[in-house]
Image (cartoon, helix red, strand yellow):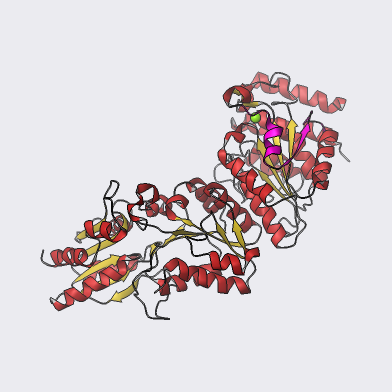
Amino acid sequence: MEELREKACRLRLQVLDMVCSKKGGHIGGDFSEMEILLQLYCREMNIDAARPDAPERDRFILSKGHSVEALYAVLADRGFFPAEELSCYLSFGGRLVGHPNNQVPGIEMNTGSLGHGLSLGVGMALAARLRGLGSRTYVLMGDGELAEGSVWEAAMAASHYGLDSLCATVDRNGLQISGSTEDVMRLEPLAERFRSFGWNAIEVPDGNDFAQLGAAYALARSTKGRPSVVIAHTVKGRGVSFMEGRAKWHHGVPAEAERLAAAGELEAAMRDGR
Amino acid sequence: MIANKQAICDNLLQLASEDRSILVLCSDSRGSASASGFAESLPEQFIELGIAEQNLVSVAAGLAAGGMRPFVLAPAAFLSSRSLEQIKVDVCYSGSNVKLIGISGGVSYGPLGLTHHAVHDIAALGVLPGLRVYMPADAEASRSLIRRLAADSLPAYVRVGRNASREVYPEGGADLSADRALTVRPGSDVTVVACGDMVACAAEASDALRDRGVSCRVLDMFCIKPLDREAVARAAAETSGIVTVEEHSAFLGLGSLVAQELAGTGVPLTRLGLPDSPVVTGSQQEVLDYYGLNAGGIARAAWALCRR
Ligand SMILES: [Mg+2]
């Protein structure tokens, strides 16, 4: 079986293709969240592409909907739709819109306007409880979107209802479109803020490391009576040296020379098992 | 006489007793929504979200995605404004089976001011893709409408007032199962197209006009969206003019939707509604009277159309 690390490189190459061929997308966030998505879709969640509407399935919401290219690559890899369809990303009349759309198999809700996902997750977790289902609900948020007040309305409600089947992840890459999150609108002390809202906050020092993510999700799963948030310290643009940690790659589109350089780095990493 | 919101909650309680997927969600609004009885009788199916309308609507969408049938009951002023984007994206765009009930709409809150008035909700929500917008005329109409909505799977917004509406329909006499305007009074000279509490006023105006020899048709256009365009076209063809009346801004509400239908036909139209400014201070009735949104004002407008 393909190693997850190898898969992460291969899917980053697919994302690079999508973004460069259509000259649009959010490659920085796609690359920072790739390991989180793969950990959830390959190791954590109870999902079956053959039964995308199974009532007992776990739910995933990409609240940071702009980083949809990585999700498309992962969903295609998991068999929700053919990988060939990735070439239809952003195409006229197609269903691979520039933000998640529930016309695509495996996508639960339309997102893209920030700050909605955690509330949707609260609703889904409440529904699972009311129906007596063991489904878990996973919500992936960006760090920039945590400035939205609705996130904290949802955080309050999730702990009020003790939703331990709800697990949020913050793709804590430290950057948003204008620069550092701490310069734009300070988030720290982020874990303390979630804890003060009644959450179990789990910090992951390297959010692009599968083992660390796996340990965090195991801890979240075993935490009862309150929701958990995994604060995954990731690197924006992870995997391509000249993109890493640079806000311009929030939605930058690589020029041809940059595309070649990026592809070269990703292919080398895949070969070397990095 | 009971308020429309009470009729809605009474019927939801009956329906929810037999269908555990039916839920009521409130934003610290259970008292004003007449939902306290529901909350006490079916606590597992009542979800309190506190004063947080954005979360309220998105949670409802999440519940719907999880197979539940949520009814959100919150003041129309806040539901149609604070959570507008959540309605647009999480309800409409995602196609969620969420029913939004805006209570105490229009100028129900009277002297409390513009913060609490909802005279913009048809304009704000009617433009959202696929969202149906309803305004029932009385408790009987509300009963019929809510039973229909509980059985379907598409989003809808229903606006009701705070106080009891005057009775328009006898028990069992309102069928809102299709998006067809209800003919409250037949008539051949002039037509009044009304919604919500204005329907009873229009009926009273029609009765007064009859005594003066004018045959005034009254249409209850509870289905503001989708508008019953055929009923408007028939009224335009069969009577000499149309008066619209609504407890909403006269701009971008029912009157504007009817005007769209009449554009280019030359059929005379008078739109009665609230002004494009914060309304005068007063009780609901004082405000409506001030702007001529009563039987007298409707009769005068209809009479003027007939005398053209
Ligand atoms: Mg970020």
Tell me: residue A111, above or below residue B171: above
Q: From where the camera sits, is residue B152 visible?
A: no
Q: Is residue B245 left or right of residue B70?
A: left
Tell me where the magenta segment starts and ends, as one range. A186-209
In the rendered image, residue A221, in percent from the top left (x then y), is placed at 81, 46
Residue B61 or residue B17, whichever sits in front: B17
Task: Answer with left or right where residue B203 lies relative to residue A265.
Answer: left
Can you see residue A147? yes
- Left or right of B141 on screen, residue B288: left
* In this picture, residue B20 sits left or right of residue A1: left
Asked which quadrant contains residue A44, the reply is: top right
**In the rendered image, which quarter contains the C terminus of chain B?**
bottom left
Furthest toward the right, the residue is: A1
| Residue A242 % position (x, y) | 70, 18
Q: How many marks?
A: 0
Residue A199 image offset from top left, x and y in percent: 72, 42
Return the residue nearer the eye: A191 or A21: A191
User: Which residue is drawn at the image coordinates 30% and 47% (left, top)?
Assistant: B278
In the image, what residue occupies the spot 56% across and 64% down? B153
Q: Is residue A181 above or below residue B112?
A: above
Q: Is residue A233 above or below residue A163?
A: above
Q: Position of residue B182 (x, y in %)?
A: 35, 73
Quarter of the image with the N terminus of chain B is bottom left
Q: Quadrant of ligand 1?
A: top right
Q: Residue furthest left?
A: B307
Magenta span contains residue A188: yes
